[in-house]
Image (cartoon, helix red, strand yellow):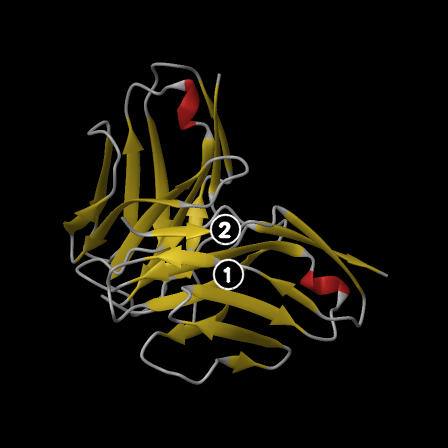
Amino acid sequence: ETGVTQSPTHLIKTRGQQVTLRCSSQSGHNTVSWYQQALGQGPQFIFQYYREEENGRGNFPPRFSGLQFPNYSSELNVNALELDDSALYLCASSLLGGEQFFGPGTRLTVL
Amino acid sequence: AQTVTQSQPEMSVQEAETVTLSCTYDTSESDYYLFWYKQPPSRQMILVIRQEAYKQQNATENRFSVNFQKAAKSFSLKISDSQLGDAAMYFCAYTYGGATNKLIFGTGTLLAVQP
């Protein structure tokens, strides 16, 4: 059984650029949730995808968007990057309403 | 609004000793779930223990146990016989379920284990 994987591990971008982060869910899971973890903080819920549809969203602006594919993998896209977007981005896969299993995260640095 | 508060930014414990990490939360829901997650330097969030609010019995997983006080909205984690591998950031988290089962995290407690 393959666990949750994320790519890339690290990423450096400049202000105003766009970025795409990827997450492969654990086998058998149909739901992916994305969290942003700023330095020294706990993770904050960005949004969740269930069967390719957005299933809930946290307090993040529309420039944070996502996709889920038929194989339940997911992408997080962030447009017009700001310095405050620098953070660890975690994805978690699950069955809907079930225990969330986290990936190792992508560290995004915005210069 | 649902919030989770961890008032201990850092804790330290001697190997083989016992340590307790504190967590309080605020919610108007009657049915919810509470969790402790461990985040080592590898960054991967690992579930340590979970507690269903409707269960009066405190959850236990090997050396890890919780003290769940529903009326006080308190949920502390006790680590017994601490090991060097327990050193990590520990996050308390809450979810009431709902449509997304989204997790609400505290700010974390960094636990150091001294040999």
Question: Does residue B15 appear to the left or right of B43 in the view shown?
Answer: right
The amino acid type of the residue labelled 2 equals Pro
**Where on the picture, by quarter, is residue A31?**
bottom left
Residue A86 location (% of width, % of height): 46, 28
Badge count: 2
Q: Residue at x 73, y 69 (%)?
A: B82
Residues under numbered marks 1 and 2 in contact, where contact means CB atoms less than 8 Å apart? no
Question: Does residue B89 appear to the left or right of A8 in the view shown?
Answer: right
Q: Nearer the viewer, residue A99 or A50?
A: A99
Residue A25 visible:
no
Task: Sort mark 2 into few (<14), some (14-19) or many (20+) by Cα contacts within 10 Å.
Answer: many
> Which quadrant holds the C terminus of chain B?
bottom right
Residue B46 visible:
yes
**Where on the picture, by quarter, is residue A4?**
bottom left
Q: Nearer the viewer, residue B12 or B28?
A: B28
Question: Does residue B25 appear to the left or right of A79 in the view shown?
Answer: right
Q: Nearer the viewer, residue B44 or B60?
A: B60
Question: Does residue A74 appear to the left or right of A110 in the view shown?
Answer: left
Residue A92 location (% of width, % of height): 37, 56
Q: Nearer the viewer, residue B41 or A69?
A: B41
Which mark is nearer the camera, 1 or 2?
1
Task: Sort mark 1 into few (<14), some (14-19) or many (20+) by Cα contacts within 10 Å.
Answer: many
Q: Is residue A101 above or below residue B62?
A: above
Residue A43 location (% of width, % of height): 42, 45
Marks 1 & 2 on one chain: no
Q: Using the image, name the chain to which the residue with label 1 belongs.
A: B
Q: Which residue is mark 1?
A: B37
Secondary structure category for the residue under label 1: strand
Residue B84 location (% of width, % of height): 76, 63
Q: Which residue is mark 2?
A: A104
